[in-house]
Amino acid sequence: MNTPWHLEHMAALDFESSDKDSETARIVTCALILGGAGRTPDTRTWLINPGIPMEPEAIKVHGVTDEYAAKHGMPAEQGVGEIAKAISEVVAAGVPLVGHNIGGYDLNLLDRECRRHLGDNLEGICRKPLTRVIDTMVLDRQAAPFRKRISEAQGPYQMRTTAETYGLDWDEDQAHGAEYDALMSARAAYRMGLIAHTPYRQRPEWVLALRPNRFNSLRDIGVDELHARQVEWYREDAANYQAWLRNEKKAKDKYDPTAVIDGHWPLRPIPEQRDGGGE
């Protein structure tokens, strides 16, 4: 049998950016951490001048101002090129990429930046499809569904919630830095895999109380199969959320009869491809 996915050597990836939309956002900071399975982490970080004004909310999250990025950050083309090269080396080596919402945001952000600055998409630069990705948000939603919001400010599946759910100490002062968030995503992935590979009755009480309890769907598989399952889980979640938004009785004030939730993971087609045409 293949090595269980959570025992693989992993490359944890996280970005902080200029806004929340991966189609328009620019990379501001990046961390890539090679580690896992008892290895000493090898960390690379980047600070980039995005070349555009950042959204105030984004600055509030990561703390990097326009002025600081302009003074201390490397040019965007150089930084994106270095990051893309590092990722291509990871992919070529078969090392899984891990992150929280990495398929919903981070890889799409990098893909758009590669197109913008390097003239090719991310998979073109890697010279192969991305088929070994581990997204802790997707895994958490699958294994422990229907979690409620922690508070008005803390959502049910954001990085802090996932980390604390799996028994990791959370340092809010370090949070929302790319290096810290990348490291926590790798640790959370390991904890999820560990629970899935623990005999059922020996799992934590909160896990035994889950209804439904789907941790066994993370058990006894390698990274490639886990990736394939995440493609389906993400697609199903997107379809269910779209249906919920289009249901006036269920969605109430969030009701949108024309809502479209893209179910592609870990890379979405560019808008022109989704719409079936160009500008």
Image (cartoon, rainbow, N blue to C red):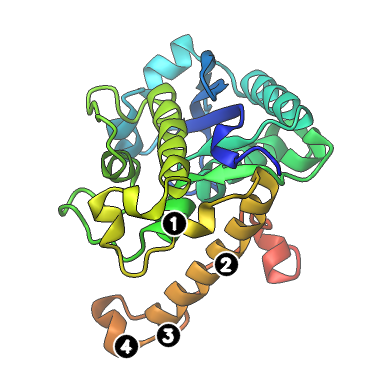
Q: How many marks?
A: 4
Q: Nearer the viewer, residue 195 or 177?
A: 195
Q: Nearer the viewer, residue 27 or 240?
A: 240
Q: Circle 1 sits on which residue?
A: 215
Question: In this picture, is 270 found above or below 274?
Answer: above
Residue at the image position 53 percent from the left and 27 percent from the top? 51
Question: In this picture, is 24 found above or below 8?
Answer: below
Q: Circle 3 sits on which residue?
A: 257
Q: Is residue 124 left or right of residue 74?
A: right
Choose the circle earlier in sequence order: 2 or 4. 2
Choose the circle earlier in sequence order: 2 or 1. 1
Q: Are the residues tagged 3 and 1 within 8 Å (C-beta)?
A: no
Amino acid on which disc 4 is placed? Glu
**Quadrant of the rendered image containing residue 59:** top left
Q: Circle 4 sits on which residue?
A: 248
Q: CA distance from mark 2 to mark 1?
A: 19 Å
**Mark 3 surroundings: few (<14), some (14-19) or many (≥20) residues within 10 A:** few
Q: Nearer the viewer, residue 90 or 106?
A: 90
**Mark 2 surroundings: few (<14), some (14-19) or many (≥20) residues within 10 A:** some
Choose the circle earlier in sequence order: 4 or 1. 1
Q: Secondary structure at mark 1?
A: helix
Query: Residue furthest toward the right?
Result: 127
Choose the circle earlier in sequence order: 2 or 3. 2
Residue at the image position 79 percent from the left and 39 percent from the top? 120
Q: Circle 2 sits on which residue?
A: 235
Q: CA distance from mark 2 to mark 3?
A: 19 Å
Q: Nearer the viewer, mark 2 or mark 4?
A: 2
Q: CA distance from mark 4 to mark 1?
A: 32 Å
Q: Nearer the viewer, mark 4 or mark 1?
A: 1
Q: Are the residues tagged 4 and 3 within 8 Å (C-beta)?
A: yes
